[in-house]
Structures are given as structure tokens and as C-alpha cells.
């Protein structure tokens, strides 16, 4: 047995690109296959915190991400009318790096893909695996473009509806949590330096986060009984309904939600895998291993932290030991984020038995400021 020398990454999203960069930087040869031939990402924003920026900085990309987005002061909780309830300022964990950052998903994609290109990592678009076989010493893969290859490790980074997971853990499927999230980009008020979360409306909450000097995005997380499917042309009207009754900056900004084609709606579907996230020489990271709800804004951070830790362990140990060490460093942290996110959604849907969301959010934010 020896350390991994050649690795296949299935999925060119946040986790896949981050792990490909980390491996290549450590001298491990890596290839990426991405199913989407256009490599498109949703246009709305992504909210991240210090632990995301710190993990990206390990790959040399923290500053680039910061430049591509809008660092803001932290999270404020507001009541329905827009009056301040609590203020959770960011706690910068990495020297000189922002504690809270908003950026558009395309801006993050650009930061990651620029590095992937600079490192010369091969990415095949519009291609995925047809089937794979793990011999114990290596994984042979047949691809949908008719080619094949043999790798020391296959990393499944193919997101919440992972096809890799489906092959090895067919019983693990994302479950609807009862809520859906609505997102829309709008102009940023000139002096807005916080991400604000308005609570107190039955069934959910809404807020906004700065993304750039010019833009912020509005998000609304609400109970969606029966997991309804919405006709695309109704999306702006439906989002407006969820934003009714909010005052303050949110009430004003909500008036700009008018174009149904620019609304991004997702039912919340989570799948948190038990330990281990690997079988033999195939491992899952990112959403494929632990997709949660967006209540803590940690999906991307968990994906990048997974990537950084896995690359580090693979560079230091033989594959089986590296995978075990990876799990030991990642499982509890990712599970805590996932279960706490789902808990916050439960509390929103059942306020009669709810705990304190401000306290829980604050506790997790502090926990995540600790090193991985
Ligand atoms: C609208 C929206 C807003 C979000 N906002 C936030 C936020 O504010 N903060 C935050 O932290 N997180 C947010 N998230 C979650 C965050 O985007 C994910 O947690 C993060 O991208 C996980 O990274 P990943 O690489 O595991 O999955 P993804 O980034 O989803 O990447 C998966 C990749 O795999 C590809 N793929 C899928 N199937 C296959 C296959 N069979 N073969 C090859 N390739 C395949 C996909 O095309 C995709 O490129 C948001 C998600 C959505 C949908």
C-alpha cells in the first residue's frame, strides 16, 4: 500500500474544486469530471463565515474570495417591524481575514475555477461515471464519454442528489424538512453593513445579506406544507407573499422582487450520512455526505473544510488511514452544523416548543471559529 497518487473527483462544485486544488497543491495528481457541460451555477448569493474564508486561505484563496464579495459586520436579529433584537458581530478567526462574507455564487465559482486552470487540473465537462469497481487496491471507472481510468481514490463531490452515494448507499436519500427557501438579488442600500434576519412571522423568517457594493440578496425560509411545486411564472408573486408583513429595510427591498425568472426557489432537503462517509476507496464529501438546511449558512464552509482536511490527510498517510483520520476530524463538526440547522428550521415551524435560536446560532458560530 502507498499514499494516493492519482485521484478522481466526481463533481466540479464547491467541494470538488476545493479538494482538487488541495490535492494538486500537495503533489497528488487529480482529474475532475463534471456532469453539467455548461458548468453553470445559480446566480444568487452565498453567505459564508470566518471558517469558510480560513479554509479557503489554506488553498491560497481566502483573500481572493474576500475581494470577490462583500465582507460585512455580522448577523443582526430583527423583529417583524425591523427593530433590532440582537447583534452577533463576526469574530475574525483568521488574522486579517473577514469574519462574515457575502458573495455571488458565480463570483465564488470564478475564484475556484481560476485556480483550477492556473494549476492545470484537467476538468472534463458534460462527463460523469458510467460505473466503477473498487478492487481494494484501486478503483476502475468507466466514463460516459466511452473512456476509462484507474485511480487510487474516487471522491464523490456530486452534491445533495449524489449519484456516487446512490450506488453505495442506495437507502440514503435527502428528505424534505418541511420548509423551502426563496432567494432574489436586489440593490444594496448604500450604508448596509450587516446581514439581518427578521423573525416573528409564523412558519419562517426572512432577511438579506450584502453581496457586493451594488447588490444584496433577500432570502425567505418558510414552511411549505406538502412540498408544493410552483409554476415558474408564479415565483415572484409567491415570494412576495412570504415577504408580506415585514418592515424595515426588508419591507422596502422586497418591493424589487418582481421578475419570476430571477427567483431561486428550493425545497429544503437534507441528508446527513452516518460515519463513515467512505467504503473502500470511495469517499463522499460536501453535500453528498452531509447536506443540511441553510439556517446557519454553512454548506459551502463545510464543503471547503472537508476538502482541505481530506487533501491534508491524503498527503500524509496511506489511503485507508487517511480516510479514517478524515472522518475523525470531520464527522462531529459537520453533524453538529447539520443537525443544528435542521433544529432551527424545526423551531421555526413549531414555535410552541422552540428553544432560543439566537443562543444556538451564537454557540455554533463560536464553535466554528475553533480550528478544524
Ligand atoms: C440556491 C442556493 C443557495 C445557497 N446558499 C448558501 C449560502 O448562502 N451559504 C452556504 O454556505 N451554502 C449555501 N448553499 C449550499 C451550498 O451551495 C452547498 O452546500 C455547497 O455548494 C456544497 O458543495 P458541493 O460541492 O458538495 O455541492 P455543489 O456545489 O452543489 O456541487 C456539486 C457538483 O456536482 C455536479 N454533479 C452532480 N451530479 C453529478 C454527477 N453524477 N457526475 C458529475 N458531476 C455531478 C453538479 O453539477 C455540481 O457542479 C446554497 C445552495 C443553493 C442551491
Image (cartoon, rainbow, N blue to C red):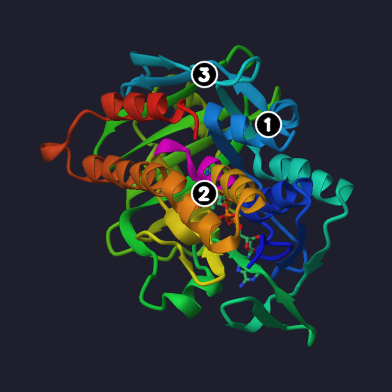
Residue 234 visible in image: no
Query: Dividing the picture into quarters, in which one does residue 261 lie?
Result: bottom right
Residue 259 spot, x, y in % from top left = 60, 47
Q: Nearer the viewer, residue 311 or 199?
A: 311
Residue 350 spot, x, y in % from top left = 17, 44
- Closer to the eye: label 2 or 1: 1
Label 2 crowd bin: few (<14), some (14–19), many (20+), radius 10 Å = many
- Where ligand 1 lies, by quadrant? bottom right
Q: Is residue 232 above or below residue 165?
A: above
Q: In the orientation shown, which residue stands out farthest toward the bottom?
A: 146
> Which of the two discs, 2 and 1, labels the residue nearer the N terminus?
1
Q: Viewed as shown, does residue 228 lie left or right of 47?
A: left
- Disc 1 CB within 8 Å of nearest ligand 1 atom: no
Residue 48 spot, x, y in % from top left = 55, 33
Q: Secondary structure at mark 3?
A: loop
Q: Which mark is residue 236?
A: 2
Is residue 301 one of those drawn in magenta? yes
Task: Tell me what residue is drawn at x 29 percent, y 40 percent.
Answer: 344
- Disc 3 CB within 8 Å of nearest ligand 1 atom: no
Task: Tell me what residue is drawn at x 35 percent, y 20 percent.
Answer: 78
Residue 67 spot, x, y in % from top left = 75, 26
Q: Secondary structure at mark 2?
A: helix
Task: Tell me what residue is drawn at x 40 percent, y 42 percent.
Answer: 333
What is the C-alpha distance between the residues marked 3 and 2? 25 Å
Q: Could you tell me which quadrant the N terminus lies in?
A: bottom right
What is the C-alpha distance between the residues marked 3 and 1? 23 Å
Q: Magenta stretch?
A: 296-304
Give the prevailing secondary structure in the magenta stretch: helix
> Which of the two discs, 3 and 2, labels the residue nearer the N terminus?
3
Which residue position holds label 3?
A: 194
Which residue position holds label 1?
A: 57
Amino acid at each position: 500500500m502507498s499514499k494516493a497518487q492519482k485521484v478522481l473527483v466526481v463533481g466540479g462544485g464547491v467541494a470538488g474544486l476545493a479538494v482538487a486544488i488541495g490535492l494538486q497543491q500537495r503533489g497528488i495528481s487529480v482529474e475532475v469530471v463534471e456532469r453539467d457541460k455548461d458548468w453553470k451555477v445559480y446566480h444568487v448569493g452565498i453567505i459564508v463565515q470566518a471558517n469558510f474564508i480560513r479554509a479557503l486561505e489554506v488553498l491560497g484563496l481566502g483573500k481572493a474570495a474576500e475581494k470577490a464579495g462583500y465582507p460585512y459586520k455580522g448577523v443582526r436579529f430583527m423583529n417583524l417591524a425591523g427593530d433590532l433584537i440582537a447583534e452577533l458581530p463576526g469574530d475574525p478567526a483568521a488574522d486579517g481575514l473577514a469574519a462574515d462574507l457575502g458573495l455571488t455564487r458565480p463570483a465564488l465559482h470564478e475564484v475556484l475555477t481560476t485556480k483550477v486552470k492556473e494549476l492545470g487540473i484537467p476538468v472534463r465537462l458534460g462527463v460523469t461515471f458510467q460505473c466503477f469497481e473498487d478492487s481494494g487496491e484501486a478503483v476502475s471507472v468507466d466514463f460516459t464519454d466511452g473512456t476509462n481510468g484507474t485511480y487510487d481514490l474516487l471522491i464523490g463531490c456530486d452534491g445533495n442528489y449524489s449519484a456516487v452515494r446512490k450506488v453505495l448507499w442506495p437507502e440514503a436519500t435527502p428528505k424534505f424538512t418541511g420548509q423551502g427557501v426563496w432567494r432574489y438579488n436586489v440593490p444594496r442600500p448604500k450604508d448596509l453593513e450587516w446581514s439581518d434576519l427578521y423573525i416573528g412571522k409564523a412558519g419562517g423568517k426572512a432577511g438579506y445579506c450584502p453581496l457586493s457594493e451594488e447588490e444584496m440578496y433577500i432570502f425567505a425560509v418558510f414552511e411549505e406544507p406538502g412540498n408544493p411545486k410552483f409554476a415558474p411564472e408564479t415565483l415572484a408573486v409567491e415570494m412576495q407573499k412570504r415577504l408580506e408583513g415585514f418592515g424595515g429595510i426588508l419591507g422596502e427591498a422586497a418591493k424589487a422582487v418582481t421578475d419570476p425568472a430571477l427567483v431561486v426557489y428550493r425545497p429544503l432537503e437534507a441528508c446527513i450520512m452516518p460515519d463513515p462517509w467512505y467504503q473502500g476507496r470511495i469517499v463522499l464529501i460536501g453535500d453528498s455526505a452531509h447536506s443540511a438546511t441553510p439556517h446557519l449558512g454553512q454548506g459551502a464552509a463545510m464543503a471547503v473544510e472537508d476538502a482541505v482536511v481530506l487533501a491534508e490527510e491524503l498527503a500524509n498517510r496511506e489511503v485507508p488511514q487517511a480516510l479514517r483520520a478524515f472522518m475523525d476530524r470531520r464527522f462531529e463538526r459537520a453533524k453538529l452544523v447539520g443537525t443544528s440547522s435542521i433544529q432551527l428550521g424545526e423551531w421555526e415551524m413549531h414555535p410552541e416548543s422552540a428553544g432560543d435560536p439566537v443562543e444556538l446560532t451564537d454557540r455554533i458560530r463560536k464553535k466554528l471559529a475553533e480550528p478544524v
